[in-house]
Image (spheres, grey):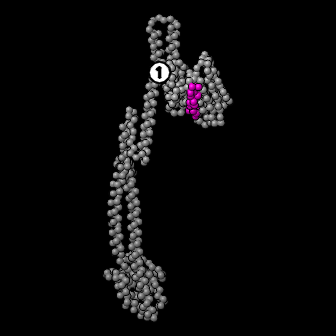
Amino acid sequence: MIGGTPMLKSIRMRLTAWHTGVLSIILAVFGTVVYFTIAKTLYERLDGELASVADVIASSLTHEIQENRNQERGEAAFRTVLPGLHQVTSQDCALAVFEENRLVTRKPPASDSDPLPATPPRTSVGTRDYASRAGWRILTTTVHIRPAQRDYVLMLAEPEAATTAELARLRRGILLAIPLTLLLAAFGGWWMARKSLSPVMTMSQTVDGIDPSSLGRRVLTPNAHDELGRLGATFNRLLARLERAFDEQRQFMADAAHELRTPVSIAHTAAQFALGQPHREETEYRDLLKTVEGQTRRLGRLVQDLFLLSRANAGPLPLRRELLYLDELVMDVANQVEVLVRQKNIRVLVEGLQETPFRGDDELLRRLLMILLDNAFQHTPSGSEVAIQFKPGDKDCLIVVRDSGPGIPERDIPHVFERFYRADKSRPHGTTDSGGAGLGLPIGRTIAEAHGGTLDLISTGPEGSTFQIALPLEVNAIEEQPLLDNDGQKADKFNSIGGSS
């Protein structure tokens, strides 16, 4: 089996073997066809010569019998002129003429052996039978002589030595040419396969030398328009994606470590301060424990955010799908946040509510809205308003959240959905319930995409920023997957308010 031996494990050798094998079959078929075609042509030529001699002899026999008034003297005259006639037509040809079983005349060949039988075989008038026997080509034909109204059987034989010699030379030429052609084809095929596959070897060596520290290397593609060039371009795109993924992973780990370090450091410092003296007042302990509790709560939310993002990176985010009404969900969330921002004198306006059934994860959808509203409240000055526009349609439902803040700087717009990116670098940690880790909008987009929808920044400027959630109403077609924890049990619900950008 090709490919089973160590020598044929190389693609180059397999290509050469297949090329040579296919060519050998083609040459064998071609040589066979050529040989039998030429053999047929040579025998047809030999048969044509015998037929021409037979026509001349029949014509001579007819003439002599007619000259002698249909008497047997015509046969005698024919026997007289036959030697001269035979010398003109074919010297090597043997001849026998029968009138039924009676031998009229016989002309033996120049050699000692006579291939013609003593009695003729039975044949029909006008037919010509050809046969090969003992190195001779024999023609048997029956002619009707009209003057005598008798049938004569003509038998002619001519040696096949010249024809067989010519076919032997042809066989030797074919048997010599085929191996030489296969040898040259095998060498040429091996050289062409080696030349064609050399870029693959270069790619293999380059890719084999790439490790996480050298993902910036790329595969050389001498010809970008052929198949190997496209393969190299595909490798380069894969390497670019891997490099980007590794960079994002390193950045994600560095940012996560930085964000986790802050609450841990604050909680640790507060605990050390509490334990620094043997006796403290109860109010001091309460203040320190409140600080520790706030930082651990922030740390827990950050861990939950990271867990959610890691689940999303591993594949489609599992959802607890249930039948709900988006208009009721929006109204409930608006009522909850209005209580939270009442001290800032910010009003929440809800417009266009209509009954809109939907199948989705209630807790995650609430969190998505809370992320956008929390983000809007952070940038809306006191005494202003945050508007929620509800726009149900035939195929999807749009939920638009607009704040009255100063807008997002143009340089920060492309990065608002990046993890750990905070447009307001001066805002201290802990000013919001999310901890300000820069995970709110990325988590919100992840939740929207898990429901088959989108979350986008529609506009931003001095009058405020507008974010839009688009949820498809055909969400029932999405396969339902329960959200489970590591022990196979339903995971704990996420907090209502998520991080902000």
- Can you name the residue that lies furthest to the right here? 355
Q: Amino acid at mark 1?
A: Leu
Q: Nearer the viewer, residue 462 or 305?
A: 462
Residue numbers of the magenta segment: 448-466
113 vs 413, nearest the viewer: 413
Please name the residue shown 36% across and 43% down the image. 202
Residue 195 painted magenta:
no
Residue pointed to by mark 1: 260
Residue 481: where, in percent of width, then height?
A: 57, 32
Q: Residue at x 36, y 84 (%)?
A: 88
The reply to whether the magenta stretch includes residue 465 is yes
Residue 18: percent from the left, percent from the top?
A: 39, 53
The quarter holding residue 489 reads top right
Q: In the image shown, does 56 or 200 lie closer to the viewer?
A: 200
The residue nearer to you, when weighing 212 against 461, is 461
Relative to residue 107, is residue 377 depicted above or below?
above
